[in-house]
Image: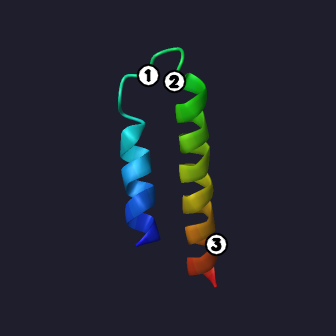
Amino acid sequence: MTSNILNYVCSANDIHITEEEDGFYRYLFALCFLGFALKFYILKY
């Protein structure tokens, strides 16, 4: 369930970003990246 949310958030990064929204989308991308890193860490063990 969480991975589906992460995939949705990641797909949101394909939207053309305005300068105002840049910080917000960078935050989403950071969450996405951390989510996949955590997922990889969990699968490793």
- Drawn side of residue 12 relative to residue 32, left or right: left
| Residue shown at 39% from the left, 55% from the top | 7
Question: Mark 3 is on which residue type?
Answer: Tyr
Name the residue beneath numbered marker 1: 17
Q: Nearer the viewer, residue 20 or 42?
A: 20
Dots 2, 1 in contact, CB < 8 A:
yes
Q: Nearer the viewer, residue 23 or 35?
A: 23
Q: Position of residue 15 (x, y in %)?
A: 35, 30
Question: Mark 2 is on which residue type?
Answer: Glu
Secondary structure of the residue carrying numbered label 2: loop
| Residue shown at 52% from the left, 33% from the top | 25
Dots 3, 1 in contact, CB < 8 A:
no
Using the image, tell me which numbered label, if any, was put on residue 21: 2
Q: Name the N-terminal-most of marks 3 and 2.
A: 2
The answer to whether residue 33 is above or below residue 18 is below
| Residue shown at 42% from the left, 36% from the top | 13
| Mark 1 neighbour density, 10 Å: few (under 14) some (14–19) many (20 or more) | some
Secondary structure of the residue carrying numbered label 1: loop
Q: Quadrant of the C terminus?
A: bottom right
Q: Position of residue 29 (x, y in %)?
A: 54, 42
Q: Quadrant of residue 17?
A: top left
The answer to whether residue 41 is above or below residue 37 is below
Question: Mark 1 is on which residue type?
Answer: Ile
Q: Position of residue 28 (x, y in %)?
A: 54, 43
Secondary structure of the residue carrying numbered label 3: helix
Q: Position of residue 27 (x, y in %)?
A: 61, 39
